[in-house]
Image: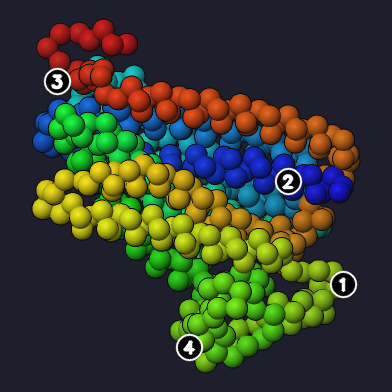
Amino acid sequence: MDALDLARWQFGVTTVYHFLFVPLTIGLGIFVAGLQTAWHRTGKEQYLTLTKFFGKLFLINFAMGVVTGIVQEFQFGMNWSEYSVFVGDVFGAPLAMEALLAFFMESTFLGLWIFGWDRLPKRAHLACIWAAAVGSNVSAYFILAANAWMKHPVGYEVVDGRARMTDLWAVLTNPTALAQVPHVIGAAFIVAGGFVLAVCGYWMLRTRRTGDGGMWRGAARAALVMTAVAGVLVAATGDTSAKLMYEQQPMKLASAEGLEHDTAAAPFSLVPGVEIPAVLSFLATNDPGATVQGAEDLQRRFERQFGPGDYRPDQTIVFWSFRVMIVFGLSTVGLSVLGLWLTRRRRPFPAWLSRALLLSLPLPLVAVTAGWLLSEIGRQPWTVAGELLTASSVSPGVSLAEVATSLTLFTLLYGALAVAETVLLTRHVRKGTEERAPLPAAERREPSLMY
């Protein structure tokens, strides 16, 4: 094992951990904004109570996401300086727009929302949470556009060994980004929906004997709708991504399907040895008889194009992460559709369904993690497809001992943060909604002493 291997492990560990907070922040922000909008329109106290309850969970997760995301910036300079030099002129624009426009918008209005409960008019306060929630989604767009460029670089030229941007619009409207952004955003809503459903399932079980679970039933129904609709979006954009993968990243597609040789009417492999004829060709091209390139044949073509080397990713990880993503994601969406059917026309949640919602909390988190592994490991051995190999991206002066030290420290630090996050979220969920939220200034008759 060398410094490159440990640098990849470090980036993988910190990024996977950080990515657990990102989709929850994206989806939960919109959900909280929706709850506050419902309170604004109806005046019902239960919506205000739910807004404050899930709003605190959102803030805990947002803070942890910011802390863990900062580490990503330092890694580029510490371990991946050659990569930073190559992509810096291209990534500068979208990442600057993310920081100066989207994140600034998100953090500023979130601060106004936190401290404006007893100071801002009702409509202005509502606008703050919507601005913060929209900001997190815009932030995701710019970051995913930069990530998509690594898979399918466009709008650039290479000058003196560095990529120089020639067309910002091409980078921001990269077809890979246009498919990837709604796919990731949809997955974020599934993660947030699964989280809300788990919390509501817990409280519906606790209040089952007292009959006080009506508020949680309403929140659960809203989360069921959000998750089911997001599932349709993820499926549709996943189909588009598969077709783009066929054109732009054939090695990833071949590895995800375990396809070794060019095959006409290529089958879709459920598990090794169980295949559905012609389905892969249809999914990739809309033509069941089309030929899909295989990994071994692509390897020979890439050797002729790029020179000697192994251009195949870790096929075991790519193959199984694809299936884990589909199975766990469909399980979450399927449970949501079943829940909508069973609770239609004001029917109560069965105890077993509430318990299933609680126990299903890990499913969407595992699904998005597997999707990230498929996306990033499937691009290997490239950091920038066709332009920059991962082996050429690592910092030349970094030593094995230095990377091992930072990997150990970050792993321990992130472990401690994971414990802190779990304790804070669990404590708040168990505490419930005992404290009543203060009203905005326009709704109060006397000053609030909450803050």
Residue 443's tag is 3
Pointer 3 and pointer 2: residues touching (CB < 8 Å)? no
Q: Which mark is residue 287?
A: 4
| Residue name at image x 73 percent, y 46 percent | 9
Reading the image, the residue beneath label 2 is 9
Which mark is in front, 3 or 1?
A: 1
Q: Residues within 10 Å of mark 2 (few under 14, many from 20)?
A: some
Whether residue 273 is visible, yes or no, is: yes
Q: Which mark is residue 25?
A: none
The quadrant in which residue 167 appears is bottom right
Name the N-terminal-most of marks 3 and 1.
Answer: 1
The residue under label 1 is which amino acid type? Answer: Pro
Cβ–Cβ under 8 Å for marks 1 and 2: no
Is 227 situated above or below 34? below
Give the foreground label among 4 and 2.
2
Nearer to us in this view, 85 or 188: 188
- The mark nearer the N terminus, 1 or 4, is 4
As measured in the structure, the alpha-carbon distance from the residue carrying label 4 to the one carrying label 3 is: 60 Å
Left or right for 229, reference 250: left
Q: Please state the horizontal and vertical placement of residue 7, each as a whole percent of the image.
A: 77, 44
**Separation of residues labelled 3 and 1 (CA atoms):** 71 Å
At horizontal 58% and vertical 36% (from top left) the residue drawn is: 69
**In this figure, which residue is indicated by the disc labeled 1?**
308
How many angstroms separate mark 3 from mark 2 (CA)? 52 Å
Q: Identify which residue, 141 or 30, lies in the foreground.
A: 30
Q: Position of residue 321 (x, y in %)?
A: 58, 60
Residue 55: which quarter of the image?
top left
**Secondary structure state at the residue bearing disc 4:** loop
Q: Position of residue 438 (x, y in %)?
A: 23, 18
- Residue kind at label 4, given as amino acid type: Asp
In the image, residue 297 above or below residue 163: below
